[in-house]
Amino acid sequence: MRVHGIKIRASLPRPQRSPGHRLASTHSPLEDSAVVIRVQNFVADGVFRAELGEFFTRELAEEGYSGCEVRVTHARTEIIIRATHTQEVLGDKGRRIRELTSLVQKRFKFPENSLELYAEKVQNRGLSAVAQCESLRYKLLGGLAVRRACYGVLRFVMESGAKGCEVVVSGKLRAARAKSMKFTDGFMIHSGQPARDFVDYAVRHVLLRQGVLGIKVKIMKGWDPEGRLGPRKPLPDTVTIIEPPIDKLITEPLSEQKGPQEQAIPPPAPQQPLEEQPVVE
């Protein structure tokens, strides 16, 4: 071990054992092999999902590909493709979806009739960062100004019910020197587990004549108890103000008298002044 060019020998305590006895292992060979197989399956599953997502991203970019979900059962494997234009994913009489099924089946060596691909329409594409990133990408390829295209995406996302949105475009926008432009609106969080649960993030690249532009889109979703437009649980720091209960009207206190009640003496009536009588002579 070398630290700043100095060689250091790491001295580790040696296990104490009596002569003629082998050092006992805490795990059996079967347990070690089971752990290795489990790790290999975990890594293989991650590589499969990553390669599948990359393939669909390149193949279904124009169809508004927004992600996929893999469901594995004992009989077959189902892959659900989420896109904004599902009819184009299916193709004429299901031809396109059959071609994709054949390609995936041959690439990953699935047995016959053990793989099914389905297309699901994105319910609210304004809350999908991938869909908005692809939309902005095609706007820039069409020659639309960067500022106008980004503000259009921001307005559409906020009108779709998002809590916040952030769009970053970096590269050689106009001049020869590269720069970055950031457009934000609403509320956005950047750290912690809520950032993973509430923020949808996507990155795309645009190849233009002057160079490559990078696009980053972040969409902050709101809390939805039904789980359609956002996570079911609210943010940890959410403050809920409960309306106070309606208080009953408090009447004036009454005093109870145990003894005999005294009759109240009415006050004397006021005497009216006497009228002066005329004197008769």
Image (tube, rainbow, N blue to C red):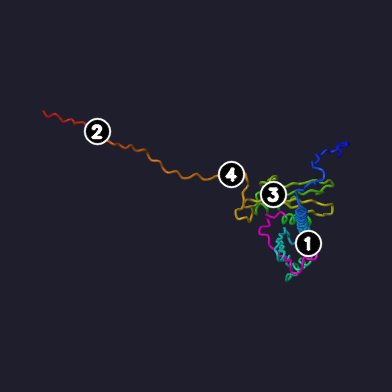
Q: Which of the 4 quarters of the picture holds residue 105?
A: bottom right
Between circles 1 and 3, the one closer to the viewer is 3
Between circles 2 and 3, the one closer to the viewer is 3
Q: How many numbered circles does the render carry?
A: 4
| Quadrant where the image shows the C terminus | top left
CB under 8 Å between callouts 4 and 2? no
Q: Residue 239 carries which label?
A: 4
The secondary element bearing badge 2 is classed as loop
Between circles 4 and 2, the one closer to the viewer is 4
Rounded to the nearest whole Å, what is the CA distance between mark 1 and mark 4? Answer: 45 Å
- The residue identified by callout 1 is 59
Front residue of 106/208: it is 106
Q: Which of marks 2 and 1 is nearer the N terminus?
A: 1
Rounded to the nearest whole Å, what is the CA distance between mark 1 and mark 3? Answer: 27 Å
At which x and y percent is residue 236? 62, 45
- Can see residue 137? no
Q: Which of marks 1 and 3 is nearer the N terminus?
A: 1
The stretch in magenta equals 104-129
Residue at the outermost bottom position: 93
Q: Is 123 on the left-hand or right-hand side of 264?
A: right
Rounded to the nearest whole Å, what is the CA distance between mark 4 and mark 3? Answer: 21 Å
Q: Which mark is residue 267?
A: 2
- The residue identified by callout 3 is 196
Kind of residue at disc 2: Pro
